[in-house]
Image (tube, helix red, strand yellow):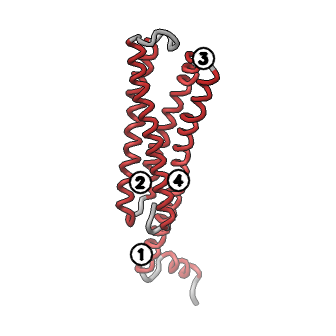
Amino acid sequence: MVQQDDIFIDLLAPSEPCLLVKLSGFLFTEYTYIMKTLSGYLYGIVLSLWVGGMSLFTFVLTPVIFKSYPRDTAGEIVGTLFPSYFLFTLAVSAAGMVLFLLSFQRSSASRARISLVLVSLAVVVSVYVNFRLYPETIKAKQEVHSFETAPDDPSRLRFRRLHAQSAVLNLIMIADGLALLVMQMRMRKLGPTEGV
């Protein structure tokens, strides 16, 4: 007569070690596939937030504020929003990099390299803007008494130069995110074995 305890021991310690190895390999492969797929979808969502959020701020919100208020007041309002905006750009670019790395598929190595360069560029630009350019711009802005008068003031010219650099980097970030989003959508169409 077979005792019930012996059946449980056989289930917990199968007589074929190969079966346990195959099962663990299968579970790891499925877990990896699920994590890469989930990371890929989250990557797409982050890219959409990146492009949409930056575009909304740049092309809708900021122009509306400057059309609705005097220049100095509009500058103060937008200046109040900048710390959150720059933190947002840093967060989405960093999250994009992490999720891209988690969702990377080996079969799309050439496209993945381009995406990795673009997402790395975005992180570097975001770090530079957050920790170097924005503080310099704030310092230059504090030296300007009014943006409605004295257009040739040296501090205003310095601010204008820093602001122009910030605007160009902002447009690069939007274009970068858009390129990543288009590449991610194209790779998704290729299927899970060929794309991110």
- Name the residue carrying label 4: 44
Residue 108: percent from left, percent from top: 39, 63
Spatial distance from mark 4 to mark 2, Cα to Cα?
13 Å
Q: Amino acid at mark 3?
A: Pro
Q: Position of residue 49 (x, y in %)?
A: 55, 45
Residue 21 shows which numbered tag? 1
The foreground one among 2 and 103 is 103
Residue toward you, 175 or 79: 175
Q: CA distance from mark 2 to mark 1?
A: 27 Å
Q: CA distance from mark 2 to mark 3?
A: 45 Å
What is the C-alpha distance between the residues marked 3 and 1?
Answer: 71 Å
| Residue matched to label 2 | 101
* 183 w.r.t. 83: above or below: below
Toward the bottom, the furthest residue is: 1
Q: CA distance from mark 1 to mark 4?
A: 34 Å
Residue 179 relative to residue 74: left or right: left
Q: Which type of secondary structure does the marked residue at label 4 adopt?
A: helix
Q: Residue extending furthest right? A: 68
Discs 1, 4 touching: Cβ within 8 Å: no
Q: Nearer the viewer, residue 54 or 42?
A: 54
Disc 4: CA contacts within 10 A as few (<14), some (14-19) or many (>=20): many
- Upstream in sequence: badge 2 or badge 1: 1
Looking at the rendered image, the quarter that the C terminus falls into is bottom left
